[in-house]
Image (cartoon, helix red, strand yellow):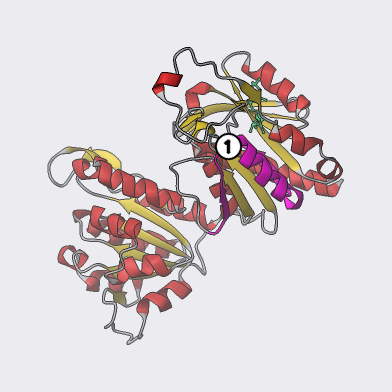
Amino acid sequence: MNLYGKNIILGVCGGIAAYKAAELIRLLKKGGADVWVVMTEKAKEFLSPLTLQTLSENPVYSDLFHNECNYPMPHIDLAKKCHLLLIAPATANTIGKCASGIADDLLSTLFLSVSSSVLIAPAMNNNMYTNPVVQENIKKLKGFNVNFVEPEFGELACGEYGEGRLAEPDAIVSKIKELLSEKKNLTGKNILITAGPTHEYLDPIRFISNLSSGKMGYAIARAAKRRGGNVILISGPSNISPPPSIQFIPVKSADDMRREVLNEYKKADVIIMAAAVSDFSPIRYSDKKIKSKESEGITLKLKKTSDILSEVSNRQAVRSQKKIIVGFALETDNIIKNAKEKLKKKNMDFIVANSINGFGSDLNKVAIIDRRGTVEDIPLVSKDKIAEILMDKIEKGLKVKYVK
Ligand code: CTP
């Protein structure tokens, strides 16, 4: 892919890797892009704006109020023309400001103003990079659909060895090409996704649940949004921030989830049930805390929850319409055999079979099985990658249904 007609805004922060901005501009220009540079005040200590102005053949911006072009609001003007905002190198300070919505200079204000994709390439000392505060900020930004090119391991400017070196400019430019070539094949399609565990309360403070983190369902929601879908995410309790610009419906119990799914499924073109819905809930709920003296020999009586996926897929409205239904199978043994049976029994188009090892992790090893019983084994990859592979299959499935 070439970058002709694309305006890339390059935000440069104050770190020793700032000099690599020169090479980035050269590669981006070589690919055909127009490049506009925004430097933080500290970046100017490391690198002369004149260098980047000469290479980009555009004025370099760093002040919110005063700039060479006399634009009254450079952050708005730059945001309007921006096809992709790249922050490279990104310091812990700028990442922290972006994650917290602090807009106290041109770059952090621009970050909040752009509606384009954002790609951040961090570079810093390895202890800073692995510091939980920085990692938490990165995680938060990823939850807002901000893309990252991870830094590399290697010798750092401080003399230490570790993770923190700015990714190679070639790798950054490849990622930009990948982001800009993303297809919006789900534009106009309504995608209903369930995610996370459910909580089945015994009393106001105790519940039955499972180890689901919601990571898979949220990754699917992000992938569907990136492809232009109208996403409705119905999620049980999870610590992950929902992606922006989607309809988010938080729920607690299997019953709440059932109610919301039944409210929303009719208008959905694709229904993806990634939630780990509890199969049972207590028959009796005590609205007062069960006291310890009552718990001696206590017996919990449970009832089966309604199988939301079966209920939806068996409804006439779904059978007669061209909806794609995707379910998950969580198994401890006979994974493929059990998943195939579930696919048939619950009338799905695809089932994603996985073992309990993926719980809570960013990675998983799954198999995706279609209606004809074809099994595609996916090796251990990120849940974001699994979501992309699944969305490719769903797109193809939608095409087939609409041609029929
Ligand atoms: N599911 C659902 N409602 C339930 C239970 C499960 O909609 N009450 C959905 C899940 O979201 C998942 C699929 O059904 O997409 C399979 O869930 P799983 O827990 O693996 O299977 P179960 O049908 O509960 O079967 P079992 O527990 O016996 O393996």
Image quarter of the N terminus: bottom right
Q: Position of residue 37 (x, y in %)?
A: 33, 69
Of residue 301 and residue 35, the one placed in the foreground of this image is 301
Q: Is residue 377 visible?
A: no
Is 268 a magenta residue? yes
Q: Nearer the viewer, residue 17 or 291?
A: 291
Position of 26 relative to 288 (above/below): below
Residue identifier under label 1: 253
Give coordinates of residue 54: x percent, y percent: 29, 73
Residue at 38% from the left image edge and 49% from the top image edge? 140
Going by the numbered disc 1, the residue's amino acid type is Ser
Region of the chain picked out in magenta, as a range: 245-273
- Ligand 1 found in image quarter: top right
> Hey, which quadrant is residue 277 in on the image?
top right
The count of marks equals 1
Depth check, front residue: 73 or 9 = 73
Q: Residue at x 32, y 78 (%)?
A: 59
**Disc 1 crowd, CA 10 A, few/some/many (<14, 14-19, 20+):** many
- Name the image quarter holding the C terminus: top right
Q: Is residue 153 left or right of residue 202?
A: left
Any magenta on residue 22? no
Q: Position of residue 358 (x, y in %)?
A: 49, 27
Dot 1: element: loop
Q: Is residue 21 left or right of residue 322?
A: left
Which residue occupies the foreground of this view, 164 or 274?
Answer: 274
Q: Residue furthest left?
A: 159
Vertical side of 163 occupied by 94: above or below:
below
Q: What residue do we see at 26% from left, 77% from top?
A: 63
Residue 163 visible in the displayed image? yes
User: How far across and down, in percent of the image, does residue 238 sit?
Assistant: 47, 40
Rendered position, 362 above or below 110: above
